[in-house]
Image (spheres, rainbow, N blue to C red):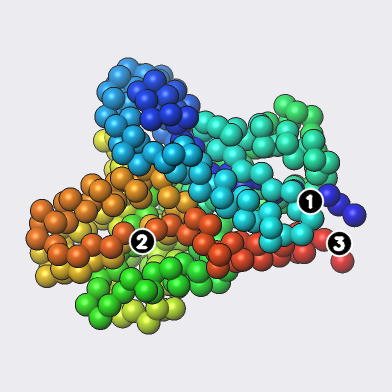
Amino acid sequence: MANRGVLMINVGTPDEPTVESVRDYLREFLLDPDVIDAPYLIRQILVRGIILRVRPGKVAPLYEKIWMDEGSPLRVYSERITESMSKHVDGIHIEHAMRYGNPSIRKGLENLREAGVTELLLLPMFPHHAQATTETALKHAYKEMKAMSWQPKTIEMGHFPTDENYINPLAKSIESHLTEGTHLLYSYHGLPVSHVKRIDASKKHCQKAADCCSVSCSANELCYGRHCMETSIAVSEKLGLPADRWSLSFQSRLGPVKWLTPSTTDKVKELVERGVRDLAIVAPAFLADGLETLEELDMGIREEFEEMGGERLTVIKCLNDDPDWILGLSEMVEGKFRASAPA
């Protein structure tokens, strides 16, 4: 019988809330061509010559605001998810890793090999497919396995924007925060338009067809924007929310390129101008809380909302180690292994 293991991969985090540590993290993150897909020389000039000179000094204090006693929130919650999952799946060794930073993908794979794993599930912790998340995580995992000369039977979780094991706990986590007058905003991590356009092999649908992300077709089967829309619709239907009670936006932009719209800042402003005073924000692209949710949304957007005249803002926590989500994720993992078993 195969000895099964799972490597759960998240984006990453600095080791400490210091300028030096943030600079090290951003260097690894932003020099990845799957994140900034500009030509090599331009990427080097942009990252080393501009971003790394300015951004670490601005970002480090933001990390310091949210740092937990145990360390970086993203790492702490990832560890809690791993521990909780290990109690729910029988006979499956689970490790978590960061694409950038620590614990590294290499370290996670080495731990799994040492545990005698012969069948490996790679589980990028991103419900929605994107080059800058899912693809780079998988690519790096395979690169490290090749360097290790390790060849376990390998399967991939893939994207899961409408899987009930994800949608049901997500909807449940939102439901208690909604009243009759609450407007729900789904705020997803931003992505350059160039990344989603690349997915469209036809070159005729993405950013060209009206409401392109609202239409399901072969051209956007792996489109991040379409996946975000699918999650929003599935959760809203589960909650019984009519179309005028929810909206979708994208946050965390970096650089001068064209990004998916609308931005979360612009959408919040539009909603307040429309008369929304009671707003709940959920960030379904993030399965564990980190800088983007704890600081960008719960501090930065909160301040903007209140300055605009908003009265009540609820930023809903990520699923983290929520028991219902742990059960759902466990079922997804076991289901993948069952599906890969010989008939």
Q: Are marks 1 and 2 in contact (CB under 8 Å)?
A: no
Q: Left or right: 208 with respect to 195?
A: left
Judging by the rendered image, the residue that carries numbered circle 2 is 316
| Amino acid on which the number 2 mark rests in the picture | Ile
- Which residue shows up at 31% across the image and 74% down it? 178
Tell me the CA gap for discs 2 and 3: 41 Å
Tell me the CA gap for discs 1 and 2: 34 Å
Q: Earlier in the sequence, mark 3 or mark 1?
A: 1
- Which residue shows up at 47% across the image and 44% down it? 74
Give the vertical position of 164 relative to 93 (above or below).
Answer: below
| Amino acid on which the number 3 mark rests in the picture | Pro
Q: Nearer the viewer, residue 226 or 176?
A: 176
Judging by the rendered image, the residue that carries numbered circle 1 is 4
Q: Which mark is residue 342?
A: 3
Q: Nearer the viewer, residue 199 or 18?
A: 18
- Camera-near label (3 vs 1) is 1
Circle 2 residues within 10 Å: few <14, some 14–19, many ≥20: many
- Which residue shows up at 44% across the image and 39% down it? 69
| Amino acid on which the number 1 mark rests in the picture | Arg
Q: Earlier in the sequence, mark 2 or mark 3?
A: 2
Q: Are marks 2 and 3 in contact (CB under 8 Å)?
A: no
Circle 3 residues within 10 Å: few <14, some 14–19, many ≥20: few
